[in-house]
Amino acid sequence: MSAATLFFAVLFYLATAVLLIGLGRKIADYARTPAPLLIPTTPAPTTTGGVVLRLLRELTLFESLFKSNLWLWVLGMLFHVGLALVLARHLRYFSEPVWAWVAVIQPFGIYAGLAMLAGLAGLWARRLLIERIRYISTPSDHLMLLLLMGITASGLMMKFVSHTDIVAVKVFFLGLLRFNPQPLPVDAPLYVHLTLVAVLMLVFPISKLLHAPGLFFSPTRNQRDNPREARHLAPWAAKLEVK
Amino acid sequence: MAGPEFTAPVLREYPVIPILQRGAMAAATPYLANEKIQEALGFPGKLVDDWHDKAIAKMGDLLGKYRSLKVFLDTCVHCGACSDKCHYFLGSGDPKNMPVARQDLLRSVYRRHFTLAGKMFPQLVGARELTREVLDEWYTYYNQCSECRRCSVFCPYGIDTAEVTMAAREILDSVGLGQKYSNEIIGKVHKIGNNLGLPGPALENTLEGLEEDIKEDTGIDVRYPLDVHGAEVLLVTPSADFFAEPHIESLIGYGKVFHAAGISWTLSSKASEAGNFGMFIGNYEQLRKVALRVREAAQELGVKRIVVGECGHAWRIAYSFWNTLTGIGAGANDPFAIQLQSQLDHRHKQPMHICELTWDLIQRGALSFDKEANDHRIITFHDSCNVARATRMGNTPGGQFEIPRHIIKAVANHYVEMAPGTTHEQTFCCGGGGGILTDEMLDLRIKGTLPRMEALKQVVDSDGVNFMVTICAICKAQFTKVVPYYGFKMSMIGGVHQLVSTAIKLGDK
Ligand code: SF4
Ligand code: SF4
């Protein structure tokens, strides 16, 4: 096994472990922390079904963002929808035989990658050019966009510039899944792509990427508006009643 | 205070997002609470020596108790969707009044002490140590938030800056930096029973005087009963309703509604205040303690229903929190709450907003009106932030917008809506909420009301609106104080039940 293969095999096992364990711990922490008062932003749904729909609308349509700022919504959509398609497209590297629906979306992958890049560029321009947004940006906000642009660009390079032996890449990843590492092709854009993706996975649980799970734990969005009908009491608040 | 010491920003026809004015509001800081005020609430009298460690420990404590705080501090992506949504930013241009920047004042310290990234690469992720300057900055800018939740409507993750503000104020109180206005008022509620420090006998006199005035006006004996055992309804209303203008006009209206509908009701000298500033300072124990007065009053008087008068944050606490804090509500299965809930009549909502009660009666045909009596008024309605974004009325979401408007249209002929984007869930705060309705904050209050004034100006110019009604004691007090700075008359401000009072037919019904 080459040094590069070994390096990437270890890196991806590590990154996956950090991502899963880190995210799992964060989610468990959010779930464990009580929400003592009902604070849904109203008008809010009164039923659980309504809450599920509200969250689905936030997840798929970015409902609140749409109310806020159309430009930002368009850029956010371009990036996230593109990302969703590209991620789905990548499933072909992990499934054998490739699932039918994954095969169907393959042709859209390129456009999705370009949409991601356009969205990211727009978001970065916003961050650099609008005074308010520049004011609230930290270096990590810029770096995160750079990282995502690097991943997208290196991915697109493999398609448009230097053709990577993706069949061999698939063999490598299937090998990882079966704990039987196979050689990774020697290919600069591929190395860049994989390294950046691993960095993204590593920082996910300690960065603002937590907005992904955070949405589902946001009390202003996930609570029912039924305070008069049911008594809502957190354990620590209930203790105040017994003394 | 004499004369306009401050000048209002100019009203613009097409509001634009201001360019940043760094430090513009750095001097707008409320007075500190003195030792006596602080200690009465169990807070340290002045800044404690080990404030740094205490503050960090308190932050850790709150992070364990409030999921909202923990999730909100983690999930912000600095997208800026909220950055132009706060009325204080729009009015002042101070970047620290952008909701995200306000959160970041606390988030930066959270990152430094509670996150791996902030411990390892503070500069990279905008983490910073809690210094005395940072603490003072918290005191200044967390007292420039009215906890109106407008930002939470627009944030893609529902991040509610009000929750962060409450946590920050709670930390500040715990190290001895309390805010005089709010904490003094909470002390008064505990000692005397209401925010204004109006003792029982004075209240009785006021109510008697009111009955005489109405008798003179209308020839009818409308009663304003106090501490009547066995009354059906306990009305809990903001104490400003007892003597401030235009608040009292709505109190007169409530009494007339009860009279016309033949419902027996009472006020309570023990719970002569619907307001609860415990929420403003983010302290659960104070919030609960103040709310429990209402429970006790209800139990002592043996009432069957609890109704809340025109007050925004009070309705939030009553509607959203009373069941949790005091058991006033329905659906409990624990002895503490059942004890009270078994006394209440559950054919009615518990608690109920006075607007729900009035609208119910109107729908049932139990009230009749002379709508023309309001013809001298061209009316618009200001949605109060807490009612709009933290409560409901009636059975369907959004009832909090519909019901007050239905009432207005049932009692008056001329109604005009302000521009979309400034009403309903996107309404602008009056600029005086959240515990800053105090003179030393006047500059901020004037600037913060700019977006509402711009929307008002539009309908004044286009439709000749001459009366803006609202269902909040703080809105009424704030607007009557600040609208003159924008060239409007303070008599332009009123309450929904003031309109009801003008039009309702008594006696011959
Ligand atoms: S809660 Fe209201 S006052 Fe506070 S930051 Fe948000 S918009 Fe501004
Ligand atoms: S809208 Fe939400 S995520 Fe975006 S900057 Fe504001 S608080 Fe952060």
Image (cartoon, rainbow, N blue to C red):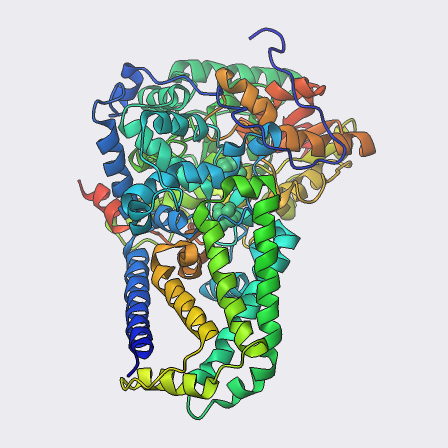
Q: Is residue A67 left or right of residue A213?
A: right
Of residues A15 and B398, which is closer to you in this image? A15
Look at the image and tell me in which quarter the C terminus of chain B lies.
Answer: top right
Residue B410 seen: yes
Q: Quadrant of the N terminus of chain B?
A: top right
Question: Which residue reaches farthest top?
Answer: B2
Residue shown at the point (39%, 68%) measured from the top left: A195
In the figure, residue B381 lies in which quadrant? Answer: top right
Q: How far across and how far down the image is residue A167, in percent?
A: 45, 88
Q: Is residue B101 rendered to the left or right of residue B284?
A: right
Residue at (49%, 77%) from the top-left corner? A88
Residue B295 screen position, x and y as percent: 34, 37
Q: Nearer the viewer, residue A21 or B222?
A: A21
Above or below, B483 against B342 in this view is above
Using the image, determine if residue B405 lies above or below residue B483.
below
As drawn, B102 above or below B203: below
Q: Outermost residue toward the bottom?
A: A97
Residue at image position (71%, 24%) is B10
User: Taking the image as drawn, is residue A41 in sight?
Assistant: no
